[in-house]
Amino acid sequence: MLPTLHTTRLTLSPFTPADAPLVQRYAGDARVASMAAFIPHPYPDGLAGQWIASHLPDHLARTSTTLAIRARDTGELRGAIGLNLTLEKRLGEVGYWVGAPFWNQGICTEAARRIIQYGFDDLGLETIRAHHFPHNPASGRVMKKAGMTRIGVIPRCTPKDGQLLDAIQWQILKTDFDTQGE
């Protein structure tokens, strides 16, 4: 069963099939898709439903945990956050997107801190990494505010729209994660 996690303003919970139209609208926005390695633009019909259907099997296989970011008071969808898992190495990689109408509200930082805490406390991870494209410095600010440390640039490593783009890599160790302020 996928978890449900809470923060002051957010609920991180399983997606439902009813979320598919908003996933397609928000993730398929060119501004959002351009910042994420694995979100296509244009976003094909039916892809959101397939993506949502993959979450529980992937979680049960212990390869990833993907959750919807929702407003805690209304339950309205704001975005997605997840951890790709390499449990034999006690390693996770956090990834996220937030719909453009909800940018610059601290949502991503709040969700990232909570999923990192889940990774350390509930999954037994020792290291959590993340990366962003150089043209998305806002994501780097999220990672920094979530307590991560920039560890470098991996040149031309991530395919996006027919190109290989650099990835700015971040990480946090369990021993360095501070739950203060939660």
Image (cartoon, helix red, strand yellow):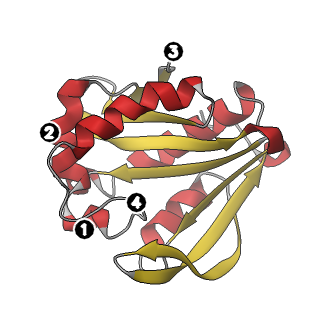
Callout 1 touching callout 3 (CB < 8 Å): no
Closer to the N terminus: mark 1 or mark 3?
A: 3
Which labelled disc corresponds to residue 21?
A: 2
Q: CA distance from mark 1 to mark 3?
A: 32 Å
Q: Which residue is mark 4?
A: 38
Question: Relative to 55, does residue 147 appear above or below in the rendering?
Answer: below
Q: Quadrant of residue 122?
A: top right
Callout 2 touching callout 4 (CB < 8 Å): no
- Provide residue 1's location: percent of width, then percent of height: 51, 15
Q: CA distance from mark 4 to mark 3?
A: 25 Å
Q: Secondary structure at mark 4?
A: loop
Q: What residue is at 34 percent from the left and 40 percent from the top?
A: 51
Q: Is residue 8 visible?
A: no
- Provide residue 162's location: percent of width, then percent of height: 37, 80
Closer to the N terminus: mark 1 or mark 4?
A: 1
Closer to the N terminus: mark 4 or mark 3?
A: 3
Q: Which amino acid, by three-letter code, is at mark 1?
A: Arg
Q: Which residue is mark 3?
A: 1
Q: Which residue is mark 1?
A: 31
